[in-house]
Image: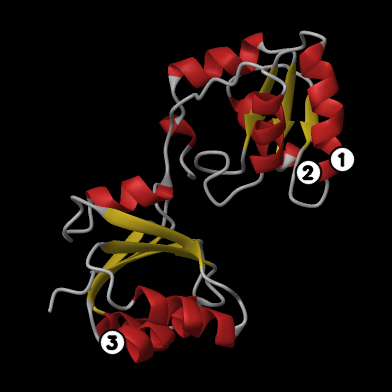
Amino acid sequence: IGNREDITLRALNILREVELVAAEDTRKSGNLLAHYGIKNRLISFHEHNEKKRTTEMIGKLLKGISIALVSNAGTPLVSDPGYRLIEAAVANKIKVTPIPGVSAATAAMSVSGLPTDSFVFVGFAPKKKAKRLKVLTGLSAEPRLLIFYESPRRILSLMEDIISCMGNRNAMLAREMTKLHEEFLRGRLTEIVKSLQTRTGIKGECTLLVAGETE
């Protein structure tokens, strides 16, 4: 999810052994491969060409060509492209093997200080306010930990909407996890919002954990 050293030995071996690497961003994945001295063919596979690429890649897989699917950060398909490809591969009885690795959701939970025995992964809330409020209101009675992904541009508005729908709950905001400027803000949602409002800007992808309803 940011730190190159978090990749597993198995993942590196797979990237060396497959015949093709399908990457969400070929430039970023190319830098990763170069860092580890891996020379392999890269093709783009992202939300804008996923439908077309899926047809192409299923054809290759049926011919016996091995392909590794990688996302920019974290685990593929967890709020990242790939669903159409995996669905089509399963339908065509093509073997699909998971290569376990890092995920922002589990990394954030491990240091949150919040109850993590059960949780709801929400991912990215709707961008449009009306739809977002509807989703948040529907989650307001959920007793399990809530996990959100959000961009730095919308994180403040998301937290403000959560407060309006769910109240001022305990939370943790993880920013730039595993990277140089890694930061964790813990406390009530209003405290985290107040801290961010004093800054000139917010950078880095954000993972927000919000305590479930306990009353």
Q: Which residue is located at x 18 percent, y 61 percent?
A: 114
SS category of the residue bearing label 1: helix
Left of 167 or right of it: where is 88? right
From this viewpoint, is residue 82 visible? no
Foreground: disc 2 or disc 3: 2
Check disc 2 and report the residue beneath it: 50
Q: Is residue 93 above or below residue 75?
A: above
Check disc 3 and report the residue beneath it: 190
Position of residue 209 measured from the top left corner of the image (x, y, whole percent)? 32, 64
The mark nearer the N terminus, 1 or 3, is: 1
CA distance separating discs 2 and 1: 6 Å
Left of 66 or right of it: where is 192? left
Amino acid, disc 3? Thr
Foreground: disc 1 or disc 3: 1
Position of residue 132 measured from the top left corner of the image (x, y, whole percent)? 52, 79
Residue 154 lies in quadrant: bottom right
Position of residue 127 measured from the top left corner of the image (x, y, whole percent)? 61, 76
Q: Which residue is located at x 54 percent, y 12 percent?
A: 13
CA distance separating discs 2 and 3: 39 Å
SS category of the residue bearing label 2: helix
Residue 198 lies in quadrant: bottom left
Marks 2/3 in contact by CB < 8 Å: the verdict is no
Amino acid, disc 1? Lys
Left of 127 or right of it: where is 144? left
SS category of the residue bearing label 3: helix
Q: Which residue is located at x 44 percent, y 23 percent?
A: 8
Q: Nearer the viewer, residue 120 or 200?
A: 120
Check disc 1 and report the residue beneath it: 52
The mark nearer the N terminus, 2 or 3, is: 2
Amino acid, disc 2? Glu
